[in-house]
Image: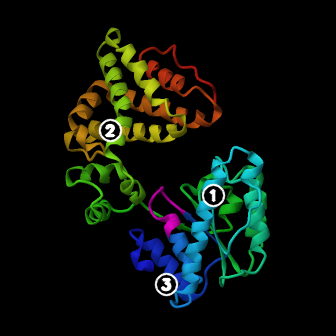
Amino acid sequence: MGFDSFLGNTKALESVREMLSSGRVPGSLMFTGPDGVGKKTLALMLAKALNCERQAGDFCGECAACRKAEEMLSATREDLARRRESKDAQRRVEGLVYFDLQLIEPITRYILIEQIRQLRSAAYTRPFELRRRVFVIDDAQAIHWQAIDLLLKVLEEPPETTTLILVCSNAYELRPTIRSRCRRLAFQPVDDSLVSSLLAKESRVPAAQRDLVVRIAAGSIARARSFDAEEFTRRRRPWLDFLDAIASGTRDDRAVNWKGLFDSTKALAEDRERFEDTLQMGYALLRDLLQVSVAGPNAKVANIDLASPLKIWSDQIGVKRIEKLKEGLDRAYRLQSRNVNQQLGLDVTALDLFDSSFTELPRD
């Protein structure tokens, strides 16, 4: 137990330990970096270390304060799950009560105004059961724009007995006024060798699949641990059909497999709730194609089980069309929150490769 159990991102961990040993933990912190690399985990560890009764500059996980902190986190997660299931918008934020250690996450697509209002109210009261109040705001970029000013007021006048930790993948999605009031710790992807060793130790993935999982995880321990090979293969299949249909058309416009193309875009847009994840899978394949185009068959690719198809597609589609496809995915990513027909966006992206008349999309 304690910080020794934290994996990767040694610089961020060292910064946290230095703050604790010096007794100078800022009232406002921001942990930024890719998803799944330990930002929230370290934030919650810091929260426990700030309250642990036995360890100075660390946490034991066994004292009354550490056990109470874990109870509060469990209650927080249960409350968030219950509120997300509610169909009634009013009940989602009804009766919000924050513990001394509180994890704040989006209830809908956003962290709502009432959540930040409750944070502001609780932040200025003394802790009830722990030595220090700690609010961990995960996915801080999802704070509703109407709640930003409320949070800013807390950051401008931080309470003496409260620490706020904002966790986000990209700090620049937050206002400069928010960023300027937080000490920022940058997190990096975890080294592949560490991820591989962890998977081997936990026996989560068959040895034959381990290299693929490590590459697909791209430095994310959370992604590696949750990897489902069968589900991954199923969800990747439409992308392979999509690329195959495009490659056939680049040889001869008359040879385009239009049915296969539109069937694949329909399958890719089927799960609207996971469309962003679907796009990320497409980005990974395009990166692999570019890698193969530049470095040849020895390129380090994520989809290592597709070495032969990647080489064929890379040769047939070409760098310019790959870049054009990437622009189309960028556009689809920006438009996904605007109730735009997702399949139509992918259809137009593909058609744009064959006929310049198919270039108009809703403007951003």
Which numbered disc, 2 or 3, marks the residue that appears first in the sequence?
3
Quarter in which the C terminus is drawn: top right
Residue 60, image x, y percentages: 48, 84
Closest to the observer, 148 or 41: 41
306 in magenta: no
Cα gap from disc 2 to disc 3, whole angstroms: 42 Å
Amino acid under label 1? Answer: Leu
Which of discs 1 and 2 lies nearer the camera? The answer is 1
Q: Which residues are magenta?
A: 32-41
State the residue position of label 1.
80
- Whether residue 170 sits left or right of residue 89 in the image: it is left
Q: Work out whether residue 172 can be spotted.
A: yes
- Whether residue 92 sits left or right of residue 184 in the image: it is right
Amino acid under label 2? Answer: Thr
State the residue position of label 3.
62
39 in magenta: yes
Disc 1 residue crowd, few under 14, some 14–19, many 20+, Cα 10 Å: some
Which of the 4 image quadrants contains residue 32? bottom right
Q: Work out whether residue 152 can be spotted.
A: no
Who's the residue at 66% across and 53% down the image? Answer: 83
Say the numbered circle drawn on residue 223.
none
